[in-house]
Image (cartoon, coloured by chain):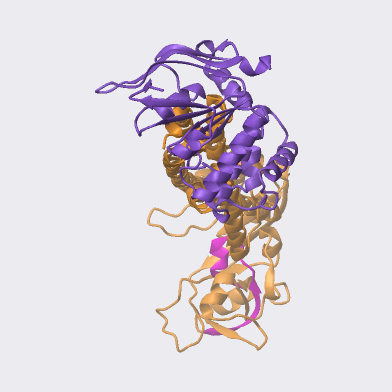
Chain colours: A orange, B purple
Amino acid sequence: MVAFYGVKARRGRAALTSIGIGIGIAAIVAVTGISASGRADLLATLESLGTNLIKASPQAGFFGTQENLPDGVLGMVERIGPVQEVTSTTQTDLLVRRTDFISEFEGGGISTLVTRSELLDVVGGKLTEGRFINDALSDIPVTVLGSVTATRLGIRDLSIPTKILIENEWFGVVGILDELKIHPDLDRSVFIGYGVAKTLFNIDEEPTTIYVRSNPAYIEDVVEVLAPSMNPENPDQVSVSRPSDALEAQEAAEVAFTNLLLGLGSVALLVGGVAIANVMVMSVLERRMEIGVRRSIGATRKEIRYQFLLESVLLSGVGGLVGVLLGAGITLGYTEYSNIVFSIPILQVLGAIVLALLIGALSGVYPAIKASKIQPAEAVRK
Amino acid sequence: MKSKTKTVISLNNISKIYEGPPPVKAVDQISLDIKEGDLVSIVGESGSGKSTLLNMIGLLDSTTEGHIEIEGQDTSTLSDDQLSKFRGEKIGFIFQSFFLLPGLTAQENVAEGLLYQGIKREERLKRAAKVLKEVGLGDRLTHLPEELSGGQQQRVAIARALVQNPAFVLADEPTGNLDKESGDNILKILKELNKQGKTVIMITHNQNHAKKFKKVVKLVDGKIVA
Protein backbone atom coordinates (compact mmCIF):
# COMPACT_ATOMS: atom_id res chain seq x y z
CA MET A 1 0.00 0.00 0.00
CA VAL A 2 1.37 3.35 -1.07
CA ALA A 3 0.49 4.96 2.31
CA PHE A 4 3.12 2.76 3.96
CA TYR A 5 5.82 4.45 1.91
CA GLY A 6 5.73 7.75 3.84
CA VAL A 7 5.83 5.93 7.17
CA LYS A 8 8.50 3.45 6.07
CA ALA A 9 10.74 6.10 4.54
CA ARG A 10 10.62 8.29 7.68
CA ARG A 11 10.39 5.81 10.51
CA GLY A 12 11.83 8.07 13.23
CA ARG A 13 9.51 10.93 12.43
CA ALA A 14 6.55 8.56 12.14
CA ALA A 15 7.29 7.17 15.60
CA LEU A 16 7.57 10.63 17.13
CA THR A 17 4.39 11.76 15.39
CA SER A 18 2.46 8.79 16.71
CA ILE A 19 3.53 9.39 20.30
CA GLY A 20 0.81 11.97 21.00
CA ILE A 21 -1.95 9.66 19.88
CA GLY A 22 -0.26 6.77 21.69
CA ILE A 23 -0.21 8.67 24.98
CA GLY A 24 -3.84 9.74 24.59
CA ILE A 25 -5.04 6.22 23.82
CA ALA A 26 -2.85 4.72 26.55
CA ALA A 27 -4.37 7.16 29.05
CA ILE A 28 -7.90 6.31 27.95
CA VAL A 29 -7.31 2.55 27.96
CA ALA A 30 -5.50 2.66 31.30
CA VAL A 31 -8.19 4.81 32.91
CA THR A 32 -11.03 2.66 31.63
CA GLY A 33 -9.05 -0.52 32.35
CA ILE A 34 -8.21 0.45 35.92
CA SER A 35 -11.76 1.66 36.47
CA ALA A 36 -13.17 -1.58 35.01
CA SER A 37 -10.75 -3.65 37.07
CA GLY A 38 -11.83 -1.79 40.20
CA ARG A 39 -15.45 -2.41 39.29
CA ALA A 40 -14.78 -6.08 38.59
CA ASP A 41 -13.05 -6.35 41.94
CA LEU A 42 -15.98 -4.61 43.62
CA LEU A 43 -18.41 -7.02 42.00
CA ALA A 44 -16.25 -9.96 43.07
CA THR A 45 -16.18 -8.56 46.61
CA LEU A 46 -19.92 -7.99 46.64
CA GLU A 47 -20.46 -11.46 45.27
CA SER A 48 -18.29 -13.06 47.92
CA LEU A 49 -19.74 -10.97 50.73
CA GLY A 50 -23.25 -10.89 49.39
CA THR A 51 -25.55 -7.94 49.10
CA ASN A 52 -28.10 -9.52 51.44
CA LEU A 53 -26.42 -8.32 54.61
CA ILE A 54 -28.27 -5.66 56.58
CA LYS A 55 -26.89 -3.67 59.46
CA ALA A 56 -29.12 -1.99 62.00
CA SER A 57 -28.18 0.22 64.90
CA PRO A 58 -29.90 2.84 67.03
CA GLN A 59 -29.76 6.43 65.79
CA ALA A 60 -27.25 8.45 67.76
CA GLY A 61 -28.86 10.53 70.50
CA PHE A 62 -29.31 14.26 70.35
CA PHE A 63 -25.85 14.84 71.84
CA GLY A 64 -24.26 12.04 69.86
CA THR A 65 -24.73 9.55 72.66
CA GLN A 66 -25.00 5.86 71.78
CA GLU A 67 -28.51 4.55 72.37
CA ASN A 68 -29.25 0.87 73.09
CA LEU A 69 -31.74 -1.27 71.23
CA PRO A 70 -34.77 -2.64 73.16
CA ASP A 71 -34.48 -5.89 75.10
CA GLY A 72 -35.18 -9.06 73.13
CA VAL A 73 -34.43 -7.37 69.83
CA LEU A 74 -32.66 -10.44 68.40
CA GLY A 75 -35.75 -12.54 68.91
CA MET A 76 -37.89 -9.92 67.19
CA VAL A 77 -35.64 -9.87 64.17
CA GLU A 78 -35.40 -13.67 63.98
CA ARG A 79 -39.15 -13.82 63.64
CA ILE A 80 -39.08 -11.89 60.33
CA GLY A 81 -39.70 -14.65 57.74
CA PRO A 82 -36.92 -14.14 55.16
CA VAL A 83 -34.23 -13.55 57.82
CA GLN A 84 -31.71 -16.38 57.62
CA GLU A 85 -29.14 -15.42 60.23
CA VAL A 86 -28.86 -12.74 62.85
CA THR A 87 -26.23 -11.70 65.35
CA SER A 88 -25.21 -8.66 67.31
CA THR A 89 -22.32 -6.69 68.73
CA THR A 90 -22.22 -4.41 71.71
CA GLN A 91 -20.10 -1.30 71.45
CA THR A 92 -18.07 -0.50 74.59
CA ASP A 93 -15.71 2.26 75.58
CA LEU A 94 -13.06 -0.15 76.86
CA LEU A 95 -9.56 1.11 76.14
CA VAL A 96 -7.24 -1.09 74.07
CA ARG A 97 -3.46 -0.91 74.49
CA ARG A 98 -0.56 -3.07 73.36
CA THR A 99 1.15 -2.93 76.80
CA ASP A 100 0.82 -1.09 80.09
CA PHE A 101 3.77 1.11 79.06
CA ILE A 102 1.37 2.95 76.79
CA SER A 103 -0.53 5.80 78.36
CA GLU A 104 -4.25 5.36 78.99
CA PHE A 105 -4.80 8.42 76.84
CA GLU A 106 -3.37 6.77 73.73
CA GLY A 107 -6.00 4.28 72.68
CA GLY A 108 -5.21 4.46 68.97
CA GLY A 109 -8.84 4.65 67.82
CA ILE A 110 -9.51 0.97 68.47
CA SER A 111 -12.99 -0.10 69.59
CA THR A 112 -13.79 -3.05 71.78
CA LEU A 113 -16.84 -4.97 70.61
CA VAL A 114 -18.53 -7.69 72.57
CA THR A 115 -19.89 -10.34 70.25
CA ARG A 116 -20.95 -13.89 69.57
CA SER A 117 -19.45 -16.71 67.55
CA GLU A 118 -21.94 -16.24 64.67
CA LEU A 119 -20.62 -12.79 63.78
CA LEU A 120 -17.88 -14.16 61.51
CA ASP A 121 -20.32 -16.16 59.39
CA VAL A 122 -22.95 -13.45 59.24
CA VAL A 123 -20.57 -10.72 58.03
CA GLY A 124 -18.72 -13.17 55.75
CA GLY A 125 -15.39 -12.69 57.50
CA LYS A 126 -12.27 -14.83 57.38
CA LEU A 127 -9.37 -15.32 59.77
CA THR A 128 -5.78 -14.95 58.75
CA GLU A 129 -4.63 -16.41 62.06
CA GLY A 130 -6.12 -18.54 64.83
CA ARG A 131 -9.81 -18.80 65.63
CA PHE A 132 -12.81 -16.59 66.38
CA ILE A 133 -14.63 -16.19 69.70
CA ASN A 134 -16.81 -19.23 70.30
CA ASP A 135 -18.95 -20.48 73.18
CA ALA A 136 -15.96 -22.14 74.83
CA LEU A 137 -13.88 -18.96 74.66
CA SER A 138 -16.66 -16.56 75.54
CA ASP A 139 -16.01 -16.63 79.27
CA ILE A 140 -12.24 -16.36 79.28
CA PRO A 141 -10.05 -13.30 78.66
CA VAL A 142 -9.15 -13.89 75.04
CA THR A 143 -9.66 -11.58 72.09
CA VAL A 144 -9.69 -11.52 68.29
CA LEU A 145 -8.22 -8.56 66.43
CA GLY A 146 -9.59 -6.80 63.36
CA SER A 147 -7.09 -6.47 60.49
CA VAL A 148 -6.37 -2.75 61.05
CA THR A 149 -6.17 -3.27 64.81
CA ALA A 150 -3.55 -5.99 64.34
CA THR A 151 -1.46 -3.70 62.17
CA ARG A 152 -1.77 -0.80 64.61
CA LEU A 153 -0.75 -2.97 67.53
CA GLY A 154 2.15 -4.43 65.52
CA ILE A 155 0.90 -8.01 65.72
CA ARG A 156 1.57 -9.83 62.46
CA ASP A 157 1.08 -13.44 63.51
CA LEU A 158 0.40 -15.56 66.53
CA SER A 159 3.39 -17.87 66.35
CA ILE A 160 4.26 -16.80 69.88
CA PRO A 161 1.60 -16.26 72.57
CA THR A 162 0.56 -12.60 72.48
CA LYS A 163 -1.42 -10.54 74.93
CA ILE A 164 -2.93 -7.07 74.84
CA LEU A 165 -4.46 -4.86 77.49
CA ILE A 166 -8.20 -4.12 77.47
CA GLU A 167 -8.79 -1.54 80.15
CA ASN A 168 -6.41 -2.97 82.76
CA GLU A 169 -6.95 -6.64 82.01
CA TRP A 170 -4.61 -8.79 79.92
CA PHE A 171 -6.32 -10.65 77.06
CA GLY A 172 -4.66 -13.39 75.04
CA VAL A 173 -4.96 -12.88 71.29
CA VAL A 174 -6.42 -16.01 69.71
CA GLY A 175 -7.20 -14.79 66.21
CA ILE A 176 -6.69 -12.08 63.61
CA LEU A 177 -9.36 -11.26 61.05
CA ASP A 178 -8.70 -10.75 57.37
CA GLU A 179 -9.73 -7.39 55.96
CA LEU A 180 -13.52 -7.00 55.88
CA LYS A 181 -13.98 -4.75 52.87
CA ILE A 182 -17.49 -3.58 53.67
CA HIS A 183 -17.04 -3.32 57.43
CA PRO A 184 -14.21 -0.90 58.09
CA ASP A 185 -15.54 -0.38 61.65
CA LEU A 186 -14.96 -4.06 62.42
CA ASP A 187 -11.44 -3.90 60.96
CA ARG A 188 -10.60 -1.29 63.61
CA SER A 189 -11.98 -3.31 66.55
CA VAL A 190 -11.07 -6.05 68.99
CA PHE A 191 -13.67 -8.70 69.83
CA ILE A 192 -14.37 -10.30 73.17
CA GLY A 193 -17.10 -12.68 74.35
CA TYR A 194 -20.21 -11.65 76.32
CA GLY A 195 -19.25 -13.92 79.24
CA VAL A 196 -15.92 -12.30 79.97
CA ALA A 197 -17.36 -8.82 79.29
CA LYS A 198 -19.88 -9.40 82.05
CA THR A 199 -17.40 -10.93 84.47
CA LEU A 200 -14.60 -8.41 84.09
CA PHE A 201 -16.37 -5.21 83.02
CA ASN A 202 -19.99 -5.78 84.05
CA ILE A 203 -21.25 -5.27 80.51
CA ASP A 204 -24.70 -6.65 79.82
CA GLU A 205 -25.87 -8.30 76.66
CA GLU A 206 -27.41 -5.17 75.17
CA PRO A 207 -26.79 -5.08 71.43
CA THR A 208 -25.81 -1.81 69.82
CA THR A 209 -25.59 -3.22 66.30
CA ILE A 210 -27.54 -6.04 64.68
CA TYR A 211 -26.25 -7.90 61.61
CA VAL A 212 -28.90 -9.70 59.55
CA ARG A 213 -28.59 -12.08 56.61
CA SER A 214 -31.78 -12.19 54.59
CA ASN A 215 -33.12 -14.23 51.71
CA PRO A 216 -31.77 -12.14 48.78
CA ALA A 217 -35.15 -12.21 47.03
CA TYR A 218 -36.79 -10.35 49.94
CA ILE A 219 -33.97 -8.04 50.93
CA GLU A 220 -35.92 -4.84 50.23
CA ASP A 221 -38.88 -6.12 52.24
CA VAL A 222 -36.68 -7.01 55.18
CA VAL A 223 -35.05 -3.58 55.08
CA GLU A 224 -38.50 -2.04 55.19
CA VAL A 225 -39.80 -4.01 58.19
CA LEU A 226 -36.58 -4.23 60.18
CA ALA A 227 -36.81 -0.90 61.99
CA PRO A 228 -40.50 -1.30 63.00
CA SER A 229 -39.77 -4.86 64.14
CA MET A 230 -36.81 -3.82 66.27
CA ASN A 231 -38.42 -0.81 67.83
CA PRO A 232 -42.16 -0.81 67.16
CA GLU A 233 -42.73 2.32 69.21
CA ASN A 234 -40.01 4.44 67.63
CA PRO A 235 -38.95 2.88 64.33
CA ASP A 236 -37.33 6.15 63.24
CA GLN A 237 -34.81 5.71 66.05
CA VAL A 238 -33.31 2.71 64.24
CA SER A 239 -30.87 3.22 61.45
CA VAL A 240 -30.92 0.45 58.83
CA SER A 241 -28.29 0.18 56.09
CA ARG A 242 -26.81 -2.26 53.62
CA PRO A 243 -22.99 -2.14 53.83
CA SER A 244 -22.80 -3.04 50.11
CA ASP A 245 -24.51 0.30 49.38
CA ALA A 246 -21.49 2.12 50.75
CA LEU A 247 -19.18 0.35 48.31
CA GLU A 248 -21.51 1.11 45.43
CA ALA A 249 -21.63 4.77 46.46
CA GLN A 250 -17.85 4.82 46.63
CA GLU A 251 -17.74 3.35 43.13
CA ALA A 252 -20.12 6.04 41.88
CA ALA A 253 -17.82 8.71 43.32
CA GLU A 254 -14.88 7.12 41.50
CA VAL A 255 -16.74 7.33 38.20
CA ALA A 256 -16.57 11.13 38.39
CA PHE A 257 -12.80 10.93 38.85
CA THR A 258 -12.55 8.46 35.99
CA ASN A 259 -14.43 10.88 33.75
CA LEU A 260 -11.98 13.61 34.64
CA LEU A 261 -9.04 11.38 33.67
CA LEU A 262 -10.83 10.42 30.46
CA GLY A 263 -11.14 14.11 29.71
CA LEU A 264 -7.39 14.54 30.15
CA GLY A 265 -6.78 11.56 27.86
CA SER A 266 -9.02 13.15 25.26
CA VAL A 267 -6.99 16.36 25.43
CA ALA A 268 -3.84 14.33 24.79
CA LEU A 269 -5.58 12.76 21.80
CA LEU A 270 -6.57 16.15 20.45
CA VAL A 271 -3.01 17.43 20.82
CA GLY A 272 -1.80 14.26 19.11
CA GLY A 273 -4.20 14.87 16.25
CA VAL A 274 -2.98 18.44 15.81
CA ALA A 275 0.63 17.18 15.87
CA ILE A 276 -0.17 14.69 13.10
CA ALA A 277 -1.86 17.39 11.01
CA ASN A 278 1.15 19.64 11.54
CA VAL A 279 3.68 16.99 10.57
CA MET A 280 1.60 15.96 7.56
CA VAL A 281 1.43 19.56 6.32
CA MET A 282 5.23 19.82 6.63
CA SER A 283 5.54 16.46 4.97
CA VAL A 284 3.49 17.65 2.00
CA LEU A 285 5.81 20.62 1.56
CA GLU A 286 8.89 18.44 1.83
CA ARG A 287 7.56 15.79 -0.50
CA ARG A 288 6.65 17.96 -3.46
CA MET A 289 9.15 16.03 -5.56
CA GLU A 290 7.50 12.74 -4.64
CA ILE A 291 4.08 14.18 -5.44
CA GLY A 292 5.41 15.42 -8.80
CA VAL A 293 6.92 12.05 -9.64
CA ARG A 294 3.71 10.25 -8.71
CA ARG A 295 1.62 12.63 -10.81
CA SER A 296 4.03 12.13 -13.74
CA ILE A 297 3.70 8.35 -13.56
CA GLY A 298 -0.08 8.49 -13.60
CA ALA A 299 -1.37 9.24 -10.11
CA THR A 300 -4.61 11.23 -10.09
CA ARG A 301 -5.39 13.96 -7.55
CA LYS A 302 -7.69 11.50 -5.79
CA GLU A 303 -4.92 8.92 -5.46
CA ILE A 304 -2.55 11.52 -3.99
CA ARG A 305 -5.29 12.63 -1.60
CA TYR A 306 -5.90 9.04 -0.48
CA GLN A 307 -2.20 8.41 -0.03
CA PHE A 308 -1.74 11.27 2.43
CA LEU A 309 -5.06 10.62 4.15
CA LEU A 310 -4.25 6.94 4.66
CA GLU A 311 -0.77 7.83 5.82
CA SER A 312 -2.27 10.04 8.50
CA VAL A 313 -4.70 7.27 9.50
CA LEU A 314 -1.81 4.82 9.57
CA LEU A 315 0.25 7.08 11.84
CA SER A 316 -2.58 7.50 14.31
CA GLY A 317 -3.56 3.84 13.98
CA VAL A 318 -0.04 2.73 14.91
CA GLY A 319 -0.07 5.25 17.76
CA GLY A 320 -3.46 3.96 18.85
CA LEU A 321 -2.32 0.34 18.78
CA VAL A 322 0.82 1.10 20.78
CA GLY A 323 -1.36 3.16 23.14
CA VAL A 324 -3.71 0.22 23.67
CA LEU A 325 -0.80 -2.08 24.50
CA LEU A 326 0.73 0.53 26.79
CA GLY A 327 -2.61 1.21 28.49
CA ALA A 328 -3.22 -2.52 28.95
CA GLY A 329 0.29 -2.87 30.39
CA ILE A 330 -0.33 -0.01 32.84
CA THR A 331 -3.65 -1.58 33.86
CA LEU A 332 -2.00 -4.97 34.31
CA GLY A 333 0.78 -3.44 36.42
CA TYR A 334 -1.75 -1.55 38.54
CA THR A 335 -3.97 -4.58 39.09
CA GLU A 336 -0.96 -6.75 39.98
CA TYR A 337 0.27 -4.10 42.39
CA SER A 338 -3.17 -3.56 43.95
CA ASN A 339 -4.01 -7.26 43.89
CA ILE A 340 -7.33 -6.73 42.13
CA VAL A 341 -8.94 -8.49 39.18
CA PHE A 342 -7.52 -7.47 35.73
CA SER A 343 -10.29 -6.38 33.43
CA ILE A 344 -10.22 -4.35 30.19
CA PRO A 345 -13.51 -3.55 28.48
CA ILE A 346 -13.01 -4.76 24.88
CA LEU A 347 -15.69 -2.44 23.56
CA GLN A 348 -13.91 0.59 24.95
CA VAL A 349 -10.56 -0.60 23.61
CA LEU A 350 -12.11 -1.00 20.16
CA GLY A 351 -13.70 2.40 20.62
CA ALA A 352 -10.29 3.90 21.45
CA ILE A 353 -8.76 2.42 18.28
CA VAL A 354 -11.65 3.69 16.17
CA LEU A 355 -11.24 7.10 17.82
CA ALA A 356 -7.52 7.12 16.96
CA LEU A 357 -8.28 6.24 13.34
CA LEU A 358 -10.94 8.92 13.20
CA ILE A 359 -8.57 11.53 14.58
CA GLY A 360 -5.97 10.41 12.03
CA ALA A 361 -8.50 10.78 9.24
CA LEU A 362 -9.59 14.22 10.40
CA SER A 363 -5.99 15.35 10.85
CA GLY A 364 -5.14 14.12 7.38
CA VAL A 365 -7.94 15.83 5.47
CA TYR A 366 -6.32 19.25 5.13
CA PRO A 367 -2.78 18.01 4.27
CA ALA A 368 -4.25 15.50 1.80
CA ILE A 369 -6.24 18.18 -0.01
CA LYS A 370 -3.17 20.43 -0.01
CA ALA A 371 -1.05 17.63 -1.51
CA SER A 372 -3.58 16.85 -4.21
CA LYS A 373 -3.76 20.48 -5.28
CA ILE A 374 -0.06 20.77 -6.04
CA GLN A 375 0.40 21.18 -9.78
CA PRO A 376 2.66 18.44 -11.17
CA ALA A 377 4.76 20.93 -13.12
CA GLU A 378 5.40 22.96 -9.96
CA ALA A 379 6.33 19.84 -8.06
CA VAL A 380 9.02 18.73 -10.53
CA ARG A 381 10.41 22.22 -11.08
CA LYS A 382 14.18 22.36 -10.58
CA MET B 1 8.47 3.99 -43.92
CA LYS B 2 5.13 5.69 -43.77
CA SER B 3 4.70 5.26 -40.03
CA LYS B 4 7.93 7.16 -39.34
CA THR B 5 6.51 10.30 -40.83
CA LYS B 6 3.29 10.30 -38.86
CA THR B 7 2.90 13.36 -36.62
CA VAL B 8 2.35 12.15 -33.07
CA ILE B 9 2.71 15.43 -31.19
CA SER B 10 1.37 18.64 -32.59
CA LEU B 11 1.81 21.98 -30.80
CA ASN B 12 -0.69 24.48 -32.16
CA ASN B 13 0.28 28.04 -31.37
CA ILE B 14 0.77 27.33 -27.68
CA SER B 15 1.68 29.92 -25.07
CA LYS B 16 2.24 29.82 -21.36
CA ILE B 17 1.82 32.95 -19.30
CA TYR B 18 2.62 32.88 -15.60
CA GLU B 19 0.41 35.34 -13.79
CA GLY B 20 2.51 37.94 -12.03
CA PRO B 21 2.80 40.49 -11.03
CA PRO B 22 4.33 41.04 -13.48
CA PRO B 23 2.97 38.41 -15.90
CA VAL B 24 5.69 36.38 -17.59
CA LYS B 25 5.26 34.80 -20.99
CA ALA B 26 7.44 31.71 -20.66
CA VAL B 27 6.36 30.15 -23.96
CA ASP B 28 5.25 32.40 -26.77
CA GLN B 29 3.01 31.05 -29.55
CA ILE B 30 4.96 27.95 -30.45
CA SER B 31 3.81 25.62 -33.20
CA LEU B 32 5.72 22.43 -33.78
CA ASP B 33 5.10 18.95 -35.16
CA ILE B 34 6.97 15.97 -33.77
CA LYS B 35 6.93 12.80 -35.84
CA GLU B 36 6.77 9.27 -34.54
CA GLY B 37 10.27 8.08 -33.72
CA ASP B 38 11.75 11.57 -33.68
CA LEU B 39 14.81 12.28 -31.59
CA VAL B 40 14.41 15.91 -30.59
CA SER B 41 16.62 18.06 -28.45
CA ILE B 42 15.45 21.38 -27.03
CA VAL B 43 18.23 23.84 -26.35
CA GLY B 44 18.36 27.37 -25.06
CA GLU B 45 19.60 29.60 -22.28
CA SER B 46 18.28 29.35 -18.74
CA GLY B 47 14.84 30.96 -18.57
CA SER B 48 14.20 30.50 -22.28
CA GLY B 49 11.13 28.34 -21.58
CA LYS B 50 12.61 24.87 -22.30
CA SER B 51 11.27 23.15 -19.16
CA THR B 52 7.89 24.87 -19.44
CA LEU B 53 7.59 23.67 -23.02
CA LEU B 54 8.59 20.11 -22.10
CA ASN B 55 6.14 20.08 -19.14
CA MET B 56 3.33 21.18 -21.43
CA ILE B 57 4.23 18.50 -24.00
CA GLY B 58 4.27 15.98 -21.13
CA LEU B 59 0.85 17.23 -19.90
CA LEU B 60 2.32 18.16 -16.52
CA ASP B 61 1.35 21.75 -17.21
CA SER B 62 -1.51 23.34 -19.10
CA THR B 63 -1.28 25.83 -21.92
CA THR B 64 -2.58 29.36 -21.51
CA GLU B 65 -3.24 29.67 -25.24
CA GLY B 66 -3.37 27.13 -28.05
CA HIS B 67 -3.62 23.39 -27.70
CA ILE B 68 -1.56 20.23 -27.96
CA GLU B 69 -2.58 17.13 -29.85
CA ILE B 70 -0.98 13.83 -28.99
CA GLU B 71 -1.70 10.89 -31.27
CA GLY B 72 -4.58 12.89 -32.72
CA GLN B 73 -6.15 13.57 -29.32
CA ASP B 74 -6.74 17.22 -28.39
CA THR B 75 -5.39 17.11 -24.84
CA SER B 76 -7.08 20.38 -23.86
CA THR B 77 -10.39 18.48 -23.80
CA LEU B 78 -9.16 15.90 -21.28
CA SER B 79 -10.01 16.06 -17.58
CA ASP B 80 -7.31 16.08 -14.91
CA ASP B 81 -7.85 12.36 -14.25
CA GLN B 82 -7.70 11.56 -17.98
CA LEU B 83 -4.46 13.52 -18.25
CA SER B 84 -3.01 11.49 -15.37
CA LYS B 85 -4.00 8.24 -17.07
CA PHE B 86 -2.56 9.49 -20.37
CA ARG B 87 0.77 10.33 -18.70
CA GLY B 88 0.86 6.99 -16.93
CA GLU B 89 0.32 5.02 -20.12
CA LYS B 90 2.03 7.04 -22.86
CA ILE B 91 4.76 9.21 -21.39
CA GLY B 92 7.94 8.37 -19.51
CA PHE B 93 9.67 11.24 -17.67
CA ILE B 94 13.33 11.55 -16.81
CA PHE B 95 14.37 14.43 -14.54
CA GLN B 96 17.71 16.13 -14.06
CA SER B 97 17.76 15.37 -10.30
CA PHE B 98 16.61 11.77 -10.85
CA PHE B 99 13.79 12.19 -8.30
CA LEU B 100 14.09 8.67 -6.94
CA LEU B 101 12.07 8.01 -3.81
CA PRO B 102 14.35 7.62 -0.78
CA GLY B 103 13.75 4.53 1.31
CA LEU B 104 12.80 2.43 -1.71
CA THR B 105 15.25 0.09 -3.45
CA ALA B 106 16.14 0.52 -7.13
CA GLN B 107 13.68 -2.24 -8.02
CA GLU B 108 10.89 -0.74 -5.88
CA ASN B 109 11.52 2.71 -7.38
CA VAL B 110 11.15 1.35 -10.90
CA ALA B 111 8.09 -0.69 -9.90
CA GLU B 112 6.42 2.53 -8.70
CA GLY B 113 6.15 3.42 -12.39
CA LEU B 114 3.42 0.76 -12.68
CA LEU B 115 1.70 1.51 -9.37
CA TYR B 116 -1.19 3.42 -10.89
CA GLN B 117 -1.79 0.95 -13.72
CA GLY B 118 -3.58 -1.52 -11.45
CA ILE B 119 -0.80 -4.11 -11.72
CA LYS B 120 -0.10 -6.40 -8.76
CA ARG B 121 3.05 -5.82 -6.72
CA GLU B 122 4.69 -9.11 -7.67
CA GLU B 123 4.24 -8.42 -11.37
CA ARG B 124 5.43 -4.84 -10.93
CA LEU B 125 8.62 -5.99 -9.25
CA LYS B 126 9.19 -8.63 -11.93
CA ARG B 127 8.88 -6.11 -14.74
CA ALA B 128 11.06 -3.61 -12.84
CA ALA B 129 13.83 -6.18 -12.50
CA LYS B 130 13.67 -6.88 -16.25
CA VAL B 131 14.00 -3.20 -17.20
CA LEU B 132 16.78 -2.62 -14.69
CA LYS B 133 18.72 -5.47 -16.32
CA GLU B 134 18.21 -3.79 -19.67
CA VAL B 135 19.81 -0.57 -18.42
CA GLY B 136 22.70 -2.55 -16.93
CA LEU B 137 21.65 -2.51 -13.28
CA GLY B 138 20.64 -6.14 -12.87
CA ASP B 139 23.03 -6.44 -9.94
CA ARG B 140 21.71 -3.36 -8.13
CA LEU B 141 18.07 -4.32 -7.61
CA THR B 142 18.12 -4.12 -3.83
CA HIS B 143 20.28 -1.02 -3.55
CA LEU B 144 18.84 2.15 -2.10
CA PRO B 145 19.30 5.39 -4.11
CA GLU B 146 21.98 6.67 -1.73
CA GLU B 147 23.99 3.51 -2.37
CA LEU B 148 24.17 4.23 -6.10
CA SER B 149 26.33 6.66 -8.10
CA GLY B 150 24.72 9.58 -9.94
CA GLY B 151 24.91 7.73 -13.28
CA GLN B 152 23.37 4.63 -11.76
CA GLN B 153 20.60 6.67 -10.15
CA GLN B 154 19.79 8.24 -13.50
CA ARG B 155 19.67 4.81 -15.10
CA VAL B 156 17.19 3.73 -12.39
CA ALA B 157 15.13 6.83 -13.26
CA ILE B 158 15.27 5.87 -16.95
CA ALA B 159 14.14 2.35 -16.05
CA ARG B 160 11.21 3.86 -14.10
CA ALA B 161 10.28 5.93 -17.15
CA LEU B 162 10.45 2.88 -19.42
CA VAL B 163 8.78 0.27 -17.26
CA GLN B 164 5.27 1.03 -18.56
CA ASN B 165 6.62 0.92 -22.13
CA PRO B 166 5.68 4.50 -23.08
CA ALA B 167 5.49 5.79 -26.64
CA PHE B 168 7.21 9.03 -25.61
CA VAL B 169 10.25 9.63 -23.45
CA LEU B 170 10.69 13.20 -22.18
CA ALA B 171 13.97 14.01 -20.51
CA ASP B 172 14.67 17.31 -18.75
CA GLU B 173 18.47 17.73 -18.76
CA PRO B 174 19.06 14.11 -17.80
CA THR B 175 22.84 14.52 -18.02
CA GLY B 176 22.96 17.86 -16.19
CA ASN B 177 24.03 16.38 -12.86
CA LEU B 178 26.38 13.76 -14.27
CA ASP B 179 30.05 13.56 -15.20
CA LYS B 180 30.97 13.29 -18.86
CA GLU B 181 31.25 9.51 -18.96
CA SER B 182 27.94 8.94 -17.17
CA GLY B 183 26.29 11.61 -19.33
CA ASP B 184 27.50 9.93 -22.51
CA ASN B 185 26.16 6.60 -21.27
CA ILE B 186 22.73 8.10 -20.61
CA LEU B 187 22.72 9.67 -24.05
CA LYS B 188 23.60 6.29 -25.57
CA ILE B 189 20.63 4.70 -23.79
CA LEU B 190 18.26 7.41 -25.03
CA LYS B 191 19.50 6.98 -28.61
CA GLU B 192 19.07 3.24 -28.29
CA LEU B 193 15.49 3.75 -27.10
CA ASN B 194 14.87 5.94 -30.11
CA LYS B 195 16.20 3.20 -32.36
CA GLN B 196 13.67 0.87 -30.79
CA GLY B 197 10.93 3.22 -32.02
CA LYS B 198 10.29 5.53 -29.11
CA THR B 199 9.89 9.25 -29.64
CA VAL B 200 12.48 10.97 -27.45
CA ILE B 201 12.49 14.66 -26.55
CA MET B 202 15.36 15.92 -24.43
CA ILE B 203 16.31 19.28 -23.00
CA THR B 204 20.03 19.84 -22.84
CA HIS B 205 22.60 22.54 -22.34
CA ASN B 206 25.28 20.36 -23.83
CA GLN B 207 25.86 21.38 -27.45
CA ASN B 208 27.74 18.13 -28.19
CA HIS B 209 24.77 16.09 -27.01
CA ALA B 210 22.32 18.28 -28.93
CA LYS B 211 24.27 17.77 -32.14
CA LYS B 212 23.76 14.04 -31.91
CA PHE B 213 19.96 14.49 -32.16
CA LYS B 214 18.11 14.42 -35.48
CA LYS B 215 16.09 17.52 -34.72
CA VAL B 216 17.22 20.49 -32.61
CA VAL B 217 14.75 23.10 -31.39
CA LYS B 218 16.37 26.28 -30.12
CA LEU B 219 14.38 28.56 -27.82
CA VAL B 220 15.01 32.21 -27.04
CA ASP B 221 12.59 34.07 -24.79
CA GLY B 222 9.93 31.42 -25.25
CA LYS B 223 10.09 31.43 -29.03
CA ILE B 224 11.59 28.92 -31.45
CA VAL B 225 14.45 30.53 -33.30
CA ALA B 226 15.87 27.46 -35.01
Q: Is residue A342 visible?
A: yes
Q: Quadrant of the C terminus of chain B?
A: top left
Q: Nearer the viewer, residue B81 or B65?
A: B65
Asked if residue B66 is positioned above or below residue B215 in the image, the reply reads: above
**Residue A316 at x, y percent in the picture:** 54, 43
Q: What segment is highlighted magenta in the picture?
A: A169-191
Residue found 45% across the figure and 25% down from its top:
B217
**Where's the N terminus of chain B, which quadrant?**
top right
A178 inside magenta stretch: yes
Residue drawn at (58%, 24%), measured in percent from left and top? B38
Query: Is residue B150 placed above or below B68 in the rendered structure?
Result: below
Closer to us: B124 or A105: B124
Q: Residue at x 39, y 79 (%)?
A: A105
When asked about the image quadrant of residue B22, the answer is: top left
Residue A310 colored in magenta in the image: no
User: Residue drawn 54% across and 50% down?
Assistant: B181
Residue A150: % across, % down: 57, 76
Q: Position of residue B50 (x, y in %)?
A: 42, 28
- Residue A35 seen in the current view: no
Residue A379, by quadrant, is: top left
Of A33 and B174, the residue lying toward us = B174
Residues B46 and B39: in front is B39
Snapshot quadrant of residue A222:
top right
